[in-house]
Amino acid sequence: MLRGSWDDPKTTYLGIKGGANDAYEHGHDAYEHGHYDLGSFVLDANGVRWAVDLGPDDYGLPDYFKPQLRCRYYRTSTIGHNTIVINGECQPPTARAVITHERFAGKNSLVIMDLSAAYPNTVSAWRGFALIDRQHVLIVDEIVPKTSLSSIDWQIHTRARVELAHATAALTSSAQSDGSEPPRFYLRVIDAAGSNWMLASASPSDPPGQDPNAGVVKLVLHIERVAQPVRLAVLLTPDAGACATPELPSALRRRLSEWVEPDLTRNSRTLGDL
């Protein structure tokens, strides 16, 4: 968990999922409650949860706790979470994700996660999260395919209203009860092989009986036919100016394996200079 402040209710807050897909609750009945969502995250800013986790579905759905069906039910499968989906497939139920590096210093914090076991069609899949100046979030994915991948989807789920403009997306929360301007949040593609944002349905198909996820929108970066290593980088910020002219510590322009080496508190440059 990365947060800009401990006492400001409008601070930027980021919660990240690692560990084991098959985590379960010990007891008389050992049910697997973990979802297949390694690398997923939730994100708050300005008192609003912009990237949401949909939570569980009805425990009474047929075979809800069996891995074969948990790979198909929207809310328990990878496709229903804020993480990478490769070839439209669910992560393996037994996959693990290890946090390889973490750094909490000054105004910038970071976590790097090895997701390779969650994506069997890759040589490696790494995901890095950085909280910059206690406010802005950078998410970087570095994926090396074993063979050509049919697709890679970077995705988040939100209950906000979404406006798209090529490489940027603006999210608007519902109107405030006090009549003030509704909060807004912004995403900008920094590096994604020329892809732009698109909206996709968060409504499940089969099996029947699932929660319809009313009011939820899925925001996706979709890349097709990936045969070479690819780097995806997305800036998420409550600051419209930072979205328009983003700045990053120079260290974060490097490969994830090099993020922990340089001093992240210095040498910020606008992305237009890179």
Image (cartoon, helix red, strand yellow):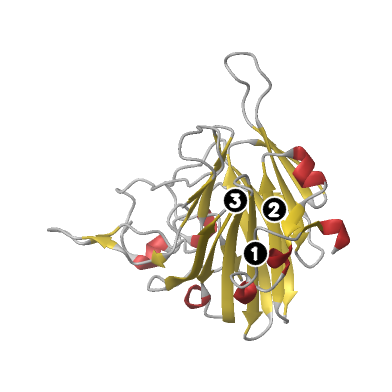
Q: From mark 1 to mark 2, how far is it between C-alphas?
A: 9 Å
Image position, residue 73 (x, y; %): 44, 56
Query: Type of residue at label 2?
Result: Leu
In this picture, residue 200 sits left or right of residue 72: right
In this picture, residue 28 sits left or right of residue 168: left
Residue 95 picture quarter: bottom left
Query: Type of residue at label 3?
Result: Lys
Q: Is residue 157 above or below residue 128?
A: above
The residue sitting at 75% across, 51% down in the picture is: 188
Helix, strand or loop status at disc 1: strand
In this picture, residue 255 sits left or right of residue 269: left
The residue sitting at 78% across, 56% down in the picture is: 196
Q: Is residue 185 above or below residue 2?
A: above
Which one is earlier in the sequence, the residue at label 3 or at label 1? 3
Neighbours of disc 3 within 10 Å: few (<14), some (14-19), many (20+): few
Which one is earlier in the sequence, the residue at label 3 or at label 2? 3
The residue sitting at 68% across, 64% down in the picture is: 252
Image position, residue 215 (x, y; %): 57, 35
From the image, state whether disc 3 or disc 1 is nearer to you.
3
Residue that mark 1 sits on: 140
* Front in this rendered view, residue 212 or 226: 226
In this picture, residue 85 sits left or right of residue 220: left
Q: Is residue 204 visible?
A: no
Residue that mark 3 sits on: 107
The residue sitting at 34% across, 50% down in the picture is: 61
Toward the right, the furthest residue is 273
Helix, strand or loop status at disc 3: loop
Residue that mark 2 sits on: 235
Q: From mark 3 to mark 1, how far is it between C-alphas?
A: 19 Å
